[in-house]
């Protein structure tokens, strides 16, 4: 709306720029000869100065004066003012008519041929949405990196940088940083757990051998059971589960629960995982969710105690239009049933929005993942089918089909190309 | 001098200067320009050793050897022919194996090329024009790069 | 804020650009009609539409700049040429660091000059002003059409990509921020001179008054072009990392040809203004100068050449610019052929006279322009005709351009010493004795200090001193210092017109540049060696010891700094750190030379490959008096500015004339 208003104003100004001067009689036309005469007089003055300074010989000065004088006389003679030709009314009317019709015609014609009046500006700030300082963070990280490049033995620097890397979604760098912290500052359960977590994130949710070593170092450090060592034991249990040893996993988690103080904040999360694994044991199809390939799934990560301990901004890979970080944090502090309700509510909102605006490929991807995580596999499959039908971008279609296949959604296996 | 004589003398002077400028240009264009060849043209035309030319093509994969004293050996190829090149100095930032390059210098009697300057492309959109053309004529120019070189 | 949703500055900028085209069509026609009918209102339409058109072009350019600053990647041009991590300065300079944006800058400057004439041309005869604006309008129409049809910077992308594709790191430099605007102010500035010439031909009248109006515009454009070329040369010198300051690259030639022709025009306009002679020649030069600017635009923007500067690659653009080129050059020359014979001849002069000297200058400058023209276009023509590929480089210009410059430079100090109409060469030589003695002393001194292995170099140094001393000599001679009592000579000194100082400054600047060029080319030392930490190399009497290398990270690149300590005679002077940069977005690296200035000479160090054993190839130069090259150009530009500030240019001609007529009317 505003754009069209501005376009109208601009057009009116342009037309007025032509029409207004036509309406007003200005100063009378100065005769050309007046100007010339003035210039020649100045030339005579200058010639006199040159002659005095010896810049021109006396004879030549005389000749030059004669030359200029002739031109001056000629100019004076021509000074009889010429009158404007008749027909001014027609000229003005014609010019005004051309401007009134031509300017809007050319303006809109050419503009509409190439312009996109419906598209708003999309400055980076707006697109970054809730992470307005994203650029500054990367700048700060650059400065710390720079500092560390010169002082690679600064434990404190690495310690500051490591969790920032994790939050920026650079788990590989985070792992490297934690290794440096451990190398320089010694091993502590907290550091080993953090290293292990970074490695898990870097490998897409799989507890690798390397990560397992780190968790073992933390869990077997003999330190008192706190959130760090508990987290380590939790991941070790997940590792067992990933290897198919669900029984070992639940046993380990039960042992953890036995050791845990009754008021530990992370107890509910572990209880939930135990329940999930036990459920999954009964339903092999659901075992899929024990091996999440993409830890970027917001709600899924709520199952791990790590997300509760960490209250930083989401990793860069997290789609910004899903549940916001605040909502996630709020969800983390809630009772499990409330949390599920809240997440379901948000997912339904997303589904509603996509129904109205079905060309949002990233939205669809998120919806499919969210349904899958919530165990609504039929819904996930349905969403994937709708998405494939409504997205035209080839690349995005491929991505959606791939996701559907990865999740082994019912009826979607044949979608692969 | 009359007015006419003056003008004639001016015109004669001007003609003289312009004629000498033209003469210099003609002489220099005969003598001071450098022809560009691709390795296979070099083989065809039998260029005399010692004459100054530009040689352009791709830096052959695996051919670059850097010596301690700043000497560099590499080969320029248009995939049909390969010419070994010796160069002493600092290579441009974008000199890489498999990338376009133009070397200026002289042929040695043994068929190798002694370069005294080496130009590489300045960015990924830039291929020295001569190199792009000669590769195109050989049908080696990859389509996805073509848009960048017209 | 919901009422703002959907609003787009970029779209409004696009529309403003289209409106500018519509207005330029009005500007091209209505004032011409008005001038031939002597209809004041129609002519005023030209003035107003020029001013409003300029506002719209400025708005469009501003909108594009805003898109760059905000990293609005929904604008395709921004996405292709910018990156959110780029520092603000380079986001802004990125606007004109690409084809579309640089054409926007071109048109912005074109319409700026038109607007200046519209706003401050009050002392011009109205019919001349109307015609000048109309011709300026033709040029604007052609280039606005070019932008809108082939190089539109406002095309949008949806959805907006997440991150931009960066700017070529070689171009990510302060030099780029300043260089193109200066250059464009220069060669687009000559468009006004062209418009004046075409308008005069249409009007059928060219006289002394015309030259007086044209000269300040020529000067202004020439100053910017001088600075722009010097800036570009310095930029290539420090950024490209091999220490060359002039490559006779077609892109450099593209700006050098209008400069040579513009310099000739500057001098012939003096003759025309003061003596009414050389009218036809001056008009022709004005047309040629802008034609060479257009040729330069064609060479750089069409992609006919491919080099650092030429980022344009779309052949349809080339054809379009070629059409503009043919239309304007052909059209103006046809107009010239048709109208020039009607122009009246001006004052007489002898071959040996001030006029003669200025004509001599023109002759050699035009001949030199012709050699550069031949060297630039011959390879293109040859390739088009025979498919033979050649390159024309420094050796060509050394035997064509240089020999033409020597007689010109030798004659420069004589020019201001000769009287108008008929001069006395022997008397002038006698007055230049002081400069001659100094030049010979410099020649001999150079021979003694540097020896005879470069026989031409002492001559070159002597020539430079001859120019500088000749300029000083002129000032001394005119003020009578040494010949007259101090008080008299001081009065004469302060009473001299500014143009006299301007001439002296510009000619001395030329001498300074000549000395810089000769000293650097002949006496520079170059050392290329491989060093390990702790080892040293030597160049030009300085010892550089390689210490170590340290990494450094900026927002959009990482670099490795190689630290050296510079010492002389065993005494450590300072530390320098040439670097290699790596730009991650484009996956490309650049070399950052370290340059240290000692007085007017420079130490220039750049880094080659690092070997597996930790050793490093280093290229170090000592370049004696190299800064003279650019200082001289700055002096020339200062000279131009001083001349521009001369009070004669500021006096409105129309006012006294009108006052006089009013008096007559009363009487």
Image (cartoon, coloured by chain):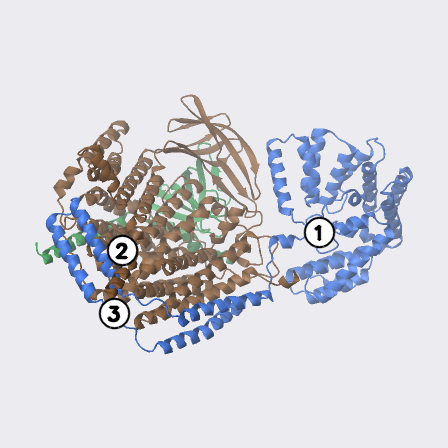
Chain colours: A blue, B green, C brown
The numbered disc on residue A318 is 1
Which numbered disc, 3 or 1, marks the residue closer to the eye?
Answer: 3
Viewer-side residue, C558 vs C59: C59
Q: Position of residue C281 (x, y in %)?
A: 23, 58
Q: Label 3 belongs to which residue?
A: A81
Question: Which residue is painted at 55% across and 65% down in the image?
Answer: A6
Q: CA distance from mark 3 to mark 2?
A: 23 Å
Q: Position of residue B98 (x, y in %)?
A: 50, 47
Q: Are marks 1 and 2 on the same chain?
A: no
Residue C490 sits in quarter: top left
What is the secondary structure assignment of the residue under circle 2? helix
The answer to whether A381 is drawn above or below residue A164 in the figure is below
Viewer-side residue, C348 vs C485: C485
Q: Quadrant of the N terminus of chain C?
A: bottom right
The numbered disc on residue C212 is 2
What is the secondary structure assignment of the residue under circle 1? loop
Viewer-side residue, C622 vs C428: C428
Residue C327 sits in quarter: bottom left
On the rendered structure, is C456 left or right of B136? Answer: left
């Amino acid at each position: 709306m505003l754009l069209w208003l501005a376009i109208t104003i601009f057009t009116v100004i342009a037309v007025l720029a032509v029409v207004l001067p036509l309406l007003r009689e200005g100063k009378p036309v100065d005769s050309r000869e007046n100007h010339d005469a003035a210039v020649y007089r100045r030339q005579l003055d200058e010639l006199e100065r040159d002659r005095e300074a010896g810049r021109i010989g006396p004879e030549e000065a005389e000749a030059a004066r004669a030359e200029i004088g002739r031109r001056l006389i000629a100019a004076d003679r021509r000074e009889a003012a010429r009158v404007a030709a008749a027909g001014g009314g027609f000229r003005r009317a014609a010019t005004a008519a051309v401007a009134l019709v031509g300017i809007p015609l050319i303006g809109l014609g050419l503009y509409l041929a190439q312009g996109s009046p419906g598209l708003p500006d999309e400055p980076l700030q707006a697109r970054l949405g809730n992470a307005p300082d994203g650029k500054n963070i990367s700048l700060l990280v650059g400065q710390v990196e720079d500092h560390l490049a010169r002082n690679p033995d600064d434990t404190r620097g690495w310690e500051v940088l490591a969790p920032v890397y994790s939050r920026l979604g650079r788990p590989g760098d985070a792992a490297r940083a934690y290794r440096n912290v451990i190398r320089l500052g010694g091993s502590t359960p907290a550091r080993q757990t953090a290293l292990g977590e970074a490695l898990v994130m870097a490998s897409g949710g799989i507890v690798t051998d390397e990560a397992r070593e780190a968790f073992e170092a933390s869990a077997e450090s003999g330190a008192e059971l706190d959130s760090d060592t508990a987290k380590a034991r939790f991941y070790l249990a997940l590792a067992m589960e990933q290897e198919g040893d669900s029984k070992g996993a639940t046993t380990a988690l039960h042992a953890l629960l036995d050791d845990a103080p009754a008021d530990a904040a992370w107890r509910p999360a572990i209880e939930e995982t135990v329940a999930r694994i036990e459920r999954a044991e009964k339903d092999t199809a659901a075992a899929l969710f024990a091996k999440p390939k993409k830890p970027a799934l917001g709600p899924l990560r709520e199952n791990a105690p790590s997300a509760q301990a960490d209250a930083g901004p989401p990793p860069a890979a997290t789609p910004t239009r899903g549940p916001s970080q605040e909502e996630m944090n709020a969800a983390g502090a809630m009772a499990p049933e409330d949390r599920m309700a809240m997440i379901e509510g948000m997912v339904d909102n997303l589904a509603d929005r996509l129904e109205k605006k079905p060309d949002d490929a990233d939205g669809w991807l998120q919806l499919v993942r969210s349904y899958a995580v919530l165990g609504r596999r039929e819904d996930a499959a349905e969403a994937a089918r709708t998405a494939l039908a409504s997205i035209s971008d080839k690349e995005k279609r491929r991505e959606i089909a791939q996701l559907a296949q990865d999740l082994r959604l019912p009826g979607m296996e044949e979608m692969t190309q | 001098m009359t007015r006419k004589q003056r003008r004639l003398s001016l015109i004669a002077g001007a003609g003289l200067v312009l004629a000498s400028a033209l003469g210099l240009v003609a002489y220099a264009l005969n003598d001071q320009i450098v022809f560009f060849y691709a390795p296979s043209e070099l083989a065809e035309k039998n260029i005399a050793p010692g004459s100054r030319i530009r040689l352009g093509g791709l830096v052959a994969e695996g051919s670059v050897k850097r010596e301690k004293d700043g000497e560099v050996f590499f080969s320029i190829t248009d995939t049909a022919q390969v010419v070994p090149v010796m160069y002493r100095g600092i290579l441009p930032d974008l000199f890489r194996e498999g990338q376009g390059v133009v070397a200026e210098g002289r042929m040695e009697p043994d068929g190798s090329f002694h370069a005294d300057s080496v130009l590489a492309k300045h960015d990924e959109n830039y291929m020295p024009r001569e190199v792009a053309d000669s590769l195109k004529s050989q049908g080696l120019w990859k389509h996805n790069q073509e848009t960048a070189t017209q | 804020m919901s009422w703002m949703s959907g609003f787009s500055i970029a779209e409004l900028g696009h529309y403003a650009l289209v409106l500018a085209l519509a207005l330029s069509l009005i500007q091209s026609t209505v004032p011409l009609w008005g001038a031939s009918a002597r209809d004041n209102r129609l002519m005023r339409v030209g003035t107003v539409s020029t001013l409003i058109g300029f506002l719209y072009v400025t708005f469009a350019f501003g909108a594009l700049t805003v898109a760059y600053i905000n990293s609005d990647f929904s604008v395709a041009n921004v996405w292709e040429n910018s990156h959110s991590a780029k520092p603000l300065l380079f986001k802004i300079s990125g606007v004109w660091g690409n084809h579309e944006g640089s054409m926007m800058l071109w048109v912005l400057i074109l319409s700026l000059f038109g607007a200046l004439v519209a706003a401050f041309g009050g002392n011009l005869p109205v019919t001349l002003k109307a015609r000048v604006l109309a011709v300026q309008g033709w040029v604007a129409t052609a280039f606005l059409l070019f932008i809108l049809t082939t190089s539109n910077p406002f095309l949008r992308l949806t959805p907006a990509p997440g991150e931009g594709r960066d700017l070529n790191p070689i171009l990510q430099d302060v030099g780029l921020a300043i260089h193109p605007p200066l250059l464009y102010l220069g060669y687009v500035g000559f468009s006004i001179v062209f418009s004046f010439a075409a308008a005069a031909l249409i009007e059928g009248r060219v006289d002394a008054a015309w030259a007086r109006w044209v000269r300040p515009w020529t000067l202004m454009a020439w100053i910017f072009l001088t600075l722009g070329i010097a800036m570009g040369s310095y930029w290539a010198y420090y950024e490209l990392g091999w220490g060359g300051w002039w490559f006779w690259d077609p892109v450099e030639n593209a700006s050098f040809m209008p400069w040579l022709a513009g310099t000739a025009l500057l001098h012939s306009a003096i003759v025309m203004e003061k003596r009414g002679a050389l009218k036809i020649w001056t008009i022709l030069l004005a047309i040629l100068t802008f034609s060479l600017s257009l040729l330069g635009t064609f060479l750089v923007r069409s992609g006919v050449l491919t080099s650092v500067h030429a980022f344009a690659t779309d052949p349809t653009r080339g054809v379009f610019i070629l059409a503009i080129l043919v239309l304007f050059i052909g059209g103006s020359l046809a107009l010239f052929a048709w109208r020039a014979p009607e122009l009246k001849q001006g004052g007489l002069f002898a071959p040996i006279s001030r006029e003669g000297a200025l004509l001599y200058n023109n002759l050699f400058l035009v001949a030199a322009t012709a050699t550069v023209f031949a060297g630039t276009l011959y390879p293109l023509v040859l390739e088009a005709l025979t498919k033979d590929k050649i390159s024309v480089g420094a050796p060509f210009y050394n035997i064509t351009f240089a020999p033409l410059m020597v007689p010109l430079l030798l004659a420069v100090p004589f020019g201001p010493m000769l009287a108008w109409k008929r001069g006395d060469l022997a008397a002038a030589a006698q007055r230049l004795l002081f400069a001659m003695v100094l030049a010979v002393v410099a020649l001999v001194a150079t021979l003694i200090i540097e020896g005879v292995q470069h026989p031409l170099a002492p001559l070159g140094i002597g020539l430079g001193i001859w120019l500088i001393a000749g300029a000083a000599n002129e000032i001394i001679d005119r003020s009578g210092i040494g010949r007259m009592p101090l008080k008299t000579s001081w009065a004469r000194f302060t009473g001299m017109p500014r143009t006299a100082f301007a001439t002296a400054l510009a000619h001395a600047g030329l001498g300074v540049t000549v000395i810089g060029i000769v000293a650097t080319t002949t006496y520079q030392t170059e050392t290329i060696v491989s060093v390990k930490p702790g080892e040293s190399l030597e160049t030009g009497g300085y010892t550089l010891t390689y210490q170590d290398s340290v990494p450094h990270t900026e927002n959009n690149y990482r670099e490795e700094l190689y630290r050296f300590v510079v010492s002389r005679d065993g005494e450590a002077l300072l530390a320098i750190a040439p670097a290699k940069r790596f730009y991650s977005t484009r996956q490309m690296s650049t070399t950052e030379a370290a340059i240290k200035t000692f007085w007017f000479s420079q130490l220039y160090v750049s880094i080659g490959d690092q070997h597996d054993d930790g050793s490093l190839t280093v290229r170090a130069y000592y370049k004696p008096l190299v800064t003279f090259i650019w200082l001289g150009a700055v002096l020339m530009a200062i000279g131009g500015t001083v001349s521009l500030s001369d009070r004669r240019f500021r006096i409105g001609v129309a006012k006294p004339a009108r006052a006089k007529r009013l008096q007559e009317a009363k009487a």
